[in-house]
Image: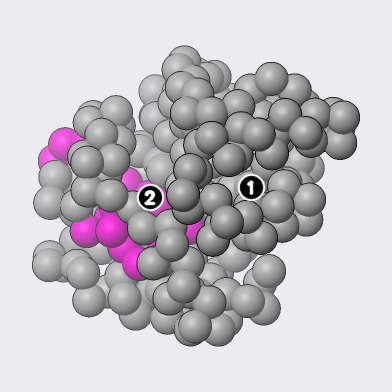
């Protein structure tokens, strides 16, 4: 997957097929309660759609992404100077700014469970108690990752219902994600987040396999 993100054509295709709608961006900015006192980090910031909006409300924003073409697109979107981008993967989190609001959309499923734990533990060092982190990603609400195979039939039915007319176009990508990447069950996400002292306060299901979580750092 890391090799794919080095291709500008793949990044362009991804941004087109999985773009971040403006109403959803506004929804998550509201969920994070972003204001001028906040420092915001976006992990897997992509083409900067979320950060360019967040920068209008926050004191400072930064984005982390491994795609050069995505980061070029993100820089073009930024209308202020209160931002910084880091070209790296999620195993390299050295020298990031301190922040109190975090966001990740369709990105942390690339990490294995053990890597998720390390990720949240590492970013926790940069986030004070009371910080908020919101994740929109692959979440198996009805089963754990180890139960994926026996729930496959119902999962495919849910995919067809959720994606509708877009299913055939996205089917290959989605199945690859389920089988070769690491979306996991809500309980597994909870355990990974707890490694950094985060507690899930809200979890919203869009479908049996996708939704968002809002977590607060309590330790």
Q: What quarter of the picture does the C terminus occupy?
A: top right
Would you name the residue on which mark 1 appears?
109
In the image, which residues are magenta? 34-52
Question: x, y (%) of residue 190?
Answer: 64, 24
Q: Is residue 86 above or below residue 107?
A: below
Most foreground residue, 109 or 151: 151
Q: In this view, does 28 lie to the left or right of 150?
A: left
What label does residue 41 carry, if any? Answer: 2
Under circle 2, the secondary element is strand
Residue ID at (78%, 42%): 114
Question: x, y (%) of residue 131?
Answer: 39, 29
Q: Is residue 3 above or below residue 22?
A: below
- The answer to whether one can see residue 83 in this image is yes
Question: x, y (%) of residue 3?
Answer: 67, 78
Q: In which quarter of the image is residue 186?
A: top right
Most foreground residue, 47 or 14: 14
Under circle 1, the secondary element is helix
Comparing marks 2 and 1, which lies closer to the viewer? Answer: 1
Q: Is residue 140 left or right of residue 134?
A: right
Residue ID at (70%, 52%): 175
Numbered circles on residues, count: 2
Most foreground residue, 68 or 152: 152
- The answer to whether one can see residue 194 in this image is no
Q: Quadrant of residue 146?
A: top right
Mark 1 Cα-neighbour bin, 10 Å: few <14, some 14–19, many ≥20: many
Residue ID at (29%, 28%): 31
């Amino acid at each position: 997957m890391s090799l794919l993100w080095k291709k500008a054509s793949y990044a362009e295709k991804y941004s087109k097929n999985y773009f971040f709608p403006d109403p959803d961006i506004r929804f998550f900015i509201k969920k994070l309660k972003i204001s001028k006192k906040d420092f915001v980090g976006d992990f897997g910031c992509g083409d900067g759609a979320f950060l360019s909006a967040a920068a209008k409300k926050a004191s400072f924003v930064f984005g982390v992404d491994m795609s050069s073409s995505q980061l070029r697109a993100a820089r073009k979107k930024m209308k202020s100077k209160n931002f910084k981008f880091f070209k790296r993967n999620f195993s390299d989190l050295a020298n990031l700014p301190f922040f109190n609001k975090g966001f990740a959309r369709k990105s942390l499923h690339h990490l294995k469970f053990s890597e998720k734990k390390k990720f949240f533990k590492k970013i926790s060092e940069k986030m004070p108690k009371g910080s908020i982190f919101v994740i929109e990603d692959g979440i198996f609400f009805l089963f754990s990752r180890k139960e994926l195979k026996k729930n496959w039939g119902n999962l495919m039915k849910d995919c067809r219902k959720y994606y509708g007319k877009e299913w055939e176009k996205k089917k290959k990508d989605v199945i690859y994600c389920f089988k070769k990447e690491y979306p996991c069950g809500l309980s597994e996400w909870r355990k990974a987040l707890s490694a950094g002292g985060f507690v899930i306060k809200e979890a919203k299901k869009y479908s049996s396999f996708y939704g968002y979580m809002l977590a607060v750092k309590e330790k």
